[in-house]
Image: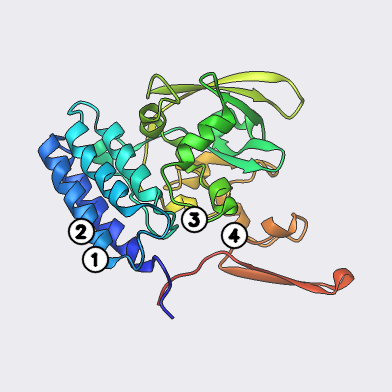
Amino acid sequence: MRQPGVVGQIAVTAIAALLAAAAQAVTPQQWALDVRLIEQRITSLHPNPARRVTWARWIEALKSVSGDAVEDDPARTAARLMQLVARLGDAHTRLLPSATVGFDRWFPLRVYEFSDGYFITAIGRRHAKLVAARVLEVDGMAIADAARQASSLLSSENDFGRREATYYLSSPPALAALGVIRDPSRMTLKLIDRSGQQRHLELAATVGDPSMAWIQWGEMFGPLFDDPRRLVTAFDHLAPLDYRTPDDSRPLHLRHRGRYAFWHLEDRGAIYAQINFLVDS
């Protein structure tokens, strides 16, 4: 049975590569080429792109991007294209930006939404004391509003996917393009730390790998996945890769983040199974 949207992921991967090549000059004409490619790839490969959008309006909005492109602000144009692809509502169809439009800058942290708020689940070692802090604001904007803006850049098919899609809260160009932060070189977080004290944290942007591979690796990973040892996590200040070593003293979902794991929970009459890595063969 054909899985909806799988070919859409292939289409968008190809689009991202051409978007990167065109963005170095960042002229409206070059953006127009990308817009045509996005339309072509999605209409020819996606099994049902109009499932959640009014197609004629979507195409009209897509074509308007190249006409509005601002030569000195490629990140904003890229963000508009990303939002349009995200509106298709297919988690396997996404437009990923590249370093050539400024998306090789990161804030060294991971913010994750839980039932009781937004928390830092991983952060650069320099700020290790603030891991697990609850985030209240980003540059004066309520964290829920900032997260809503950030999640608009990635498709989600349900509420769980939307809550997962806070990755671009780590991205300076994305947050600046969305109007969440004013200066793409830094941001200020209003926090409540583990002791209950209100704190302010200013983070500077750092150059990193533009790949978004880390978003698939769980809440303990962040944008510095090229060297995860630079991060500490909220559970006992472990480094992200420490979870690859089994430890039954940790909570079930953190006991072993290898390829897969399972445990027999005798007291509950259940088997807990966890699949952490899945690769097409």
Provide the residue designation for mark 1: 44
Q: Tell me the kind of residue under disc 2.
A: Gln
Gap in angstroms between the C-alphas marked 1 and 3: 27 Å
Question: Quick check: 221 left or right of 61?
Answer: right
Q: In terms of secondary structure, where does tag 4 sit?
A: helix
Q: Earlier in the sequence, mark 2 or mark 3?
A: 2
Whether pointer 1 and pointer 2 mark residues with C-beta atoms closer than 8 Å, the reply is yes
Provide the residue designation for mark 2: 40
Q: Which mark is residue 97?
A: none
Q: Residue furthest bottom?
A: 1
Q: Earlier in the sequence, mark 1 or mark 4?
A: 1
Q: Assign the C terminus to one quadrant of the image.
A: bottom left
Closer to the camera: disc 2 or disc 4? Answer: 2
Category of crowding for the residue at label 3, using alpha-carbon neighbours closer than 10 angstroms: few (below 14), some (14–19), many (at least 20): few
Q: In terms of secondary structure, where does tag 3 sit?
A: helix
Q: Earlier in the sequence, mark 4 or mark 3?
A: 3
Closer to the camera: disc 1 or disc 4? Answer: 1
Q: Tell me the kind of residue under disc 4.
A: Arg
Residue 272 place in picture, x, y as percent: 73, 69
